[in-house]
Image (cartoon, rainbow, N blue to C red):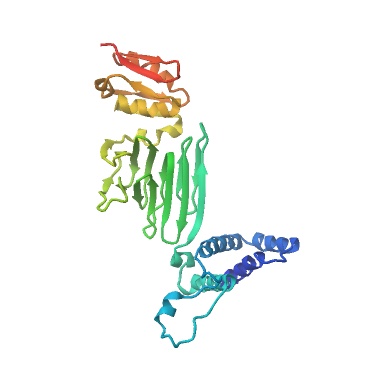
């Protein structure tokens, strides 16, 4: 059966299911059609997403839809534009999508730029989850992270609302892969990078390939930073001010192995990283001490051990206070 016929069948099933009188026997017949081929399920799922987006287009107050631009261009003596109800218009739009699927030479979702794949994922404390995407890309989500994925024919758009993620992006020149995080955006074609968003900063580190980072996406003349392997960027989430970072290969997404690698890392950054796993603030009394560099390996399952070992490397005292927070003070 050709592709147009399959789209037409999917449209008929979808419209029938939304009408009164749909029975359990009809549902079983639909499930049998869906089970007959993975392609049936894919087309029907895409049809449902398209119908959802088309339903968002408003009708006139009397419940009719009219092509307003065409009607406005007609002389007053011309016949009135046709009045279609929602179902008639939706049926026509879905049928047109079936023709576009073959006639245009590519998916009708690409022509309309409607979503073909969407998912929202959230991880719990202590949970790490790997998400395989339909284009061959993958995302590893760190604990307490929230990610939304929206693929269409023209773009692969993701939003990291909170937390941290490690991205392996399949190359596709026709569909850039973007990740929004707060006011910032990372854009790639094919690469491997890590992104963390947690006030007061968003941090991007690149392992392979190249990424473009816009610290303030909505700015009139948004500055673009190009990052290559071994480089990173720290963005102040309040001001959008960006600062270049080095990104040793072993530190990019190191948390996936259960360990954090620090190599001549300022103590302030170490404290900021460890407190995410401790669930408690890590405070440093002296600004000069915060700038001190430290190297080492910390276990994400027990980061307090790393803090308690700091006095062996630096002239500091480390205490855990009654409220659970940690304080690092100079002994000089």
The quarter of the image holding the N terminus is: bottom right
**Residue 230 at least partly seen:** no
Q: Is residue 258 above or below residue 227?
A: above
Q: Position of residue 147 (x, y in %)?
A: 47, 44
Give the quadrant of residue 167.
top left
Going by the image, does 92 lie left or right of 265? right
The residue at 28%/35% (across/down) is 246
Residue 20: image location, x then y, percent:
70, 66
Outermost residue on the bottom side: it is 77
Quarter-of-image position of residue 305: top left
Q: Which residue occupies 35% across, 51% down?
A: 188
Q: Seen from this angle, which residue lies furthest top?
A: 331
Name the residue at 39% across, 38% down: 196
Measured as percent of width and height from the top left, residue 109 is found at 48, 64
Residue 222 vs 315, above or below: the answer is: below
Comparing 254 with 63, the one in front is 63
């Amino acid at each position: 059966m050709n592709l147009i016929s399959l789209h037409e069948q999917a449209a008929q099933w979808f419209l029938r299911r939304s009408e009164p009188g749909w029975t359990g026997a009809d549902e079983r017949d639909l499930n049998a059609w869906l089970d007959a081929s993975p392609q049936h399920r894919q087309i029907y799922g895409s049809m449902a997403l398209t119908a959802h987006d088309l339903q968002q287009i408003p009708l006139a107050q009397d419940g009719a839809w009219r092509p307003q631009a065409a009607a406005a261009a007609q002389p007053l003596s011309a016949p009135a534009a046709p009045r279609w109800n929602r179902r008639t218009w939706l049926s026509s739009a879905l049928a047109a999508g079936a023709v576009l699927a073959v006639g245009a030479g590519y998916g009708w979702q690409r022509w309309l730029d409607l979503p073909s794949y969407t998912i929202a994922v959230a991880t719990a404390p202590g949970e790490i989850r790997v998400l395989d995407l339909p284009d061959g890309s993958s995302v590893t989500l760190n604990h307490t992270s929230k990610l939304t994925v929206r693929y269409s024919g023209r773009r692969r758009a993701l939003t990291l609302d909170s937390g941290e993620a490690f991205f392996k992006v399949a190359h596709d020149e026709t569909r850039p892969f973007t990740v929004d995080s707060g006011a910032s955006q990372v854009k790639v074609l094919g690469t491997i990078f890590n992104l963390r968003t947690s006030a007061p900063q968003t941090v991007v580190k690149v392992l392979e390939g190249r990424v473009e980072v816009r610290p303030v996406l909505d700015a009139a003349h948004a500055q673009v930073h190009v990052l290559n392997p071994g480089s990173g960027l720290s963005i102040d989430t309040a001001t959008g001010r960006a600062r270049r970072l080095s990104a040793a290969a072993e530190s990019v997404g190191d948390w996936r192995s259960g360990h954090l690698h620090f190599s001549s890392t300022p103590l302030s950054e170490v404290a900021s990283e460890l407190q995410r796993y401790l669930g408690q603030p890590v405070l440093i009394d002296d600004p000069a001490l915060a700038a001190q560099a430290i190297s080492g390996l910390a276990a994400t399952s027990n980061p307090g051990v790393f803090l308690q070992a700091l006095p062996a490397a630096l002239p500091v005292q480390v205490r855990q206070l009654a409220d659970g927070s940690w304080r690092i003070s100079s002994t000089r």
